[in-house]
Image: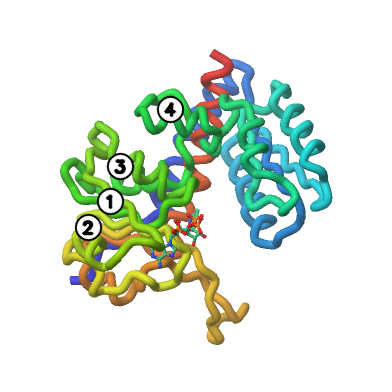
């Protein structure tokens, strides 16, 4: 029997409804949560991502500031823009869209964001809190969203072998850190794979929960997946598709058609992890406003 689809759009709608409800409660005491989305340059994919984040913020009842800055902006000027947002009481969450132009050090920018406004959860203070299991920081939106997908789909995680393919700071590492925590939505035995992993298949085929964030279209095939595994596909790769109007389509890191024949549950691309990332950003921003306006 083909795997059950994990409907990221439906679960994201629930999360966004919760964020909107909490934003409404804040409004009752005169606080409008504010999200600043900063985009440097005009990379088409980043323009789409930032616009959808700002739109989601408005739909959630938040104040949204969409700051578009020229690609030639200096690092110093960008840092001072961040300083101004840090000091702005209307702004509770700040997100600087990555990647930044080559002349700007992304770590310097991330470190400058006030950790209490770091709704992306990339500041070292928040990364550290996540690693030691403290709950009052911000968790990066994509791995946080994946944990919610697993919980809402009824996946029991304790004691399971969880294999994460990819070790980026925004997905793989925080994902692994979350799944090894001592709580009912985690408690997994975690393996992290990357380009130096010898015999990837030997690892992935032992996974009860397989989370793939490698950015390689269709790299996980049926023979690499244990029958009955839960498969979460983070990859969003644009591939050629002459049958589509634009000539391209999105494809995940998992070879969906073959893997769904062996998995028990699987996320589609699109419509799986993607919508959760934005939903968790909304929740993080509402939390930021709740925490700083108590
Ligand atoms: N849906 C969403 O909301 C969302 C959010 C974020 C990212 N994404 C997508 O998720 C994918 C990963 O994103 P990312 O930012 O984490 O990418 P990234 O920074 O490029 O990291 C990719 C990771 O995958 C590993 N990797 C690459 N090829 C591999 C292979 N053949 N075998 C084993 N490991 C391999 C790399 O290993 P090394 O470290 O050894 O190089 C690296 O750790 C991309 O397609 C991205 O577009 C989606």
Which residue is denoted by mark 2 in the rendering?
207
Q: Nearer the viewer, mark 3 or mark 1?
A: 1
Nearest to N terminus: mark 3 or mark 4: 4
Which residue is denoted by mark 3 in the rendering?
179
Q: How many marks?
A: 4
Q: Give SS at disc 1.
A: strand
Q: Is residue 133 above or below residue 156?
A: above
Cβ–Cβ below 8 Å for labels 2 and 4?
no
Nearest to N terminus: mark 4 or mark 1: 4
Marks 2 and 4, how far apart at CA: 27 Å
Residue under the image location 48 percent in, 43 percent down? 141
Marks 4 and 1, how far apart at CA: 21 Å
Q: Give SS at disc 3.
A: helix
Tell me residue 105's x, y (percent): 68, 44
Q: Nearer the viewer, mark 4 or mark 1?
A: 1
Tell me residue 85's x, y (percent): 72, 29
Per the rendering, the mark at residue 230 is none
Nearest to N terminus: mark 1 or mark 2: 1
Nearest to N terminus: mark 2 or mark 4: 4
Q: Give SS at disc 4.
A: helix
Q: Is residue 82 above or below residue 279?
A: above
């Amino acid at each position: 029997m083909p795997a059950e689809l994990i409907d990221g759009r439906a679960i994201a709608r629930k999360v966004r409804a919760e964020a909107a409800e909490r934003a409404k409660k804040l409004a009752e005491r005169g606080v409008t949560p504010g999200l600043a989305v900063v985009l440097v340059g005009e990379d088409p994919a980043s323009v789409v991502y930032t616009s959808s984040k700002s739109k989601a913020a408005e739909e959630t009842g938040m104040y949204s500031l969409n700051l578009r800055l020229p690609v030639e902006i200096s690092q110093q000027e960008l840092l001072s823009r961040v300083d101004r947002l840090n000091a702005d009481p209307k702004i509770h969450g700040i997100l600087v869209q990555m990647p930044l132009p080559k002349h700007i050090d992304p770590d310097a920018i991330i470190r400058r964001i006030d950790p209490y406004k770091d709704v992306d959860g990339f500041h070292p203070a928040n990364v550290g809190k996540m690693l030691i299991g403290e709950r009052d920081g911000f968790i990066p939106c994509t791995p946080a969203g994946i944990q919610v997908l697993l919980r809402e789909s009824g996946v029991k995680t304790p004691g399971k072998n969880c294999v994460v393919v990819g070790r980026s700071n925004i997905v793989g590492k925080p994902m692994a850190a979350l799944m090894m925590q001592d709580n009912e939505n985690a408690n997994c035995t975690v393996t992290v794979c990357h380009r130096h992993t010898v015999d990837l298949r030997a690892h992935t085929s032992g996974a009860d929960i397989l989370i793939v964030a490698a950015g390689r279209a269709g790299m996980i095939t049926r023979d690499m997946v244990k029958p009955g595994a839960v498969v979460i596909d983070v990859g969003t790769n644009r591939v050629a598709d002459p049958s589509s109007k634009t000539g391209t389509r999105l494809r995940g890191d998992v070879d969906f058609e073959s893997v769904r024949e062996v998995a028990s549950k699987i996320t589609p691309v699109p419509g799986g992890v993607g919508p959760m990332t934005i939903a968790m950003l909304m929740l993080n921003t509402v939390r930021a406003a709740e925490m700083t306006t108590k």
